[in-house]
Image (cartoon, rainbow, N blue to C red):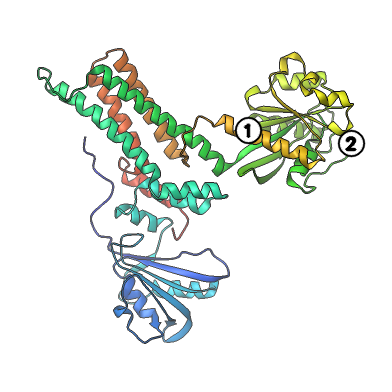
Amino acid sequence: MREQPTRTSDPVKDTIAAVITAPGTGAMGALRLSGPHAFAAAALVFRSKSGRATEALSGYSLTFGGVYLEGSFLDQALLLKMKAPHSFTGEDVAELQCHGGMVVMRRLMEAVTSLQGLLIRPAEPGEFSQRAFLNGKMDLSQAEAVMELVSASNPRAAFIAAGQLAGGLSREIKRLREGILMVLAEIEVEIDFPDEEWSGSAGAATRRDSVLRLLDEAAGLIASSDRGRIYREGIRVVFYGRPNVGKSSLLNGILREPRAIVTEEPGTTRDVLEEQILLKGIPVILTDTAGIRETGSQAEQAGVDRAKEMAARADLIVYVVDLPEGMQKEDALLLAELDKEKTIIVLNKQDLAPPEAGRDEYGMLPDAFKEWACCSLCALEPESLESLADSIRLFIDQRYSGAPKEEFLLNSRQRDALLRARQALAAAAEALTKEIPEDVVAIDLKQAWSCLGELTGESLQTALVETIFSKFCLGK
């Protein structure tokens, strides 16, 4: 059962360098060197203000001085030295922090990669993180969490990514793999020694229960990633309905700015309009669409077709009805095509409706739609928009309420590996239930164990590891 790890104990021979701050002008720019020649390269371009030789500076220190190229002063700088193995990459690391000018950083990068007698080359995208992985500083799920943290678009996504960087996902995967190994150990002992009584054996029924528990835990991780996905990608909310019912007004009201054109003329919106906001702490992509109706205009018909496409892709559809007009036949036909579980019916223009219309909003709905989520409001009133925001948040909470307390951000590769692990565990549980020979069960369990190892990098081929890190941004 022991795997050949993808990590290598052979030291990396060359030293890599890259500007690790974002391109452009800023208060600070930083260049990182990692590898056996990192300190030697820093010594050739940096001079401390105190006059101490760079080689004599202690590790894990920050020293003020200047950067000199061919004897000429380039910029003031700070030198940060981190000795192996206590650095991000596990190697000797030197960072030169200067003022954040593009010319300065470009000249410094050119200088360190052309130093005579030192093998220093520009880093490939993701190579610092890859070396951290290869040197055992982090597993693959932690390394990928670095990019999740860098690309986080909201505080919650950053918080979840930081938890994964600290090893939260790794611990869950390790616990699952250890549970699988325990069951495998029992099965293999009984296969190898069928006539021996082993006091540690729990029996086939207990092994089945253990696999079912592991299956539930894997399903819980997938559910948690479903909720985590909304913090990375956002919930796509599509305003949908007939023309002139107030879809664009709702968009403008929630955004608190006139983003969409609103007129009394039906068919004003002819294309898809998207805006991203944080709604009750959840990233939401609000999508305004053309009103659905039969039209002789090619431009408007194209907008109608796009509206239907967006509704099909939506996480949540806000179907808007004109309350003064009441529910029309066309509304009922359009609603019948939608998924009840991801639709909220909004009866808009409550301020223009007769008093009795607002007393019982469900009274406006045909019997077929009285169990659908529904609210009445006025798109021009902030209080009404707040109630719609509450309804959207309630939908999100109910949709993802099955997720465990901890959330994870899984990319497509990680999610695929976890789904395959769950499938293999389900096959093992079914085989144990049907009392299929346990050597067959062992095959499924080994498959699940290997799939889970793909998340941490313990079961991946070297070429695939390199492909994963090549998608990182330069300097990470």
For the question of whether residue 450 can be seen, the reply is: no
Label 2 belongs to which residue? 265
Q: Residue at x 24, y 30 (%)?
A: 182
Front-most of 120 and 414? 414
Question: In terms of image quadrants, where is residue 264?
Answer: top right
Q: Residue 418 appears at what percent x and percent y?
A: 40, 34
Q: Is 9 drawn above or below residue 23 in the view shown?
A: above
Where's the C terminus, which quadrant?
bottom left
Mark 2 or 1, which is nearer the eye? 1
Picture residue at 36% right of the left edge, 54% below the top? 130
Decide if residue 297 is on the left or right side of residue 281: right
> Residue at left 63%, top 33%?
394
**Number of callouts in the render?**
2
Residue 417: percent from the left, percent from the top? 39, 35
C-alpha gap between disc 2 and disc 1: 33 Å
Q: Could you say which quadrant of the image residue 91 lies in?
A: bottom left
Q: Which mark is residue 16?
A: none
Three-letter residue code for mark 1 = Leu
Please identify the residue farthest to the top as the structure is shown.
434
Circle 1: element type: helix
Q: Give residue 14's position: percent from left, percent from top.
A: 31, 64
Q: Is residue 83 above or below residue 323?
A: below
- Among the two numbered marks 2 and 1 on one chain, the one whose residue lies closer to the N terminus: 2
* 368 vs 303, nearest the viewer: 368
Name the residue at 20% across, 29% down.
Answer: 185
Q: Is residue 443 visible?
A: yes
Amino acid identity at mark 2: Glu
Residue for badge 1 = 394
Mark 2, other Cα within 10 Å: few <14 / some 14–19 / many ≥20: few
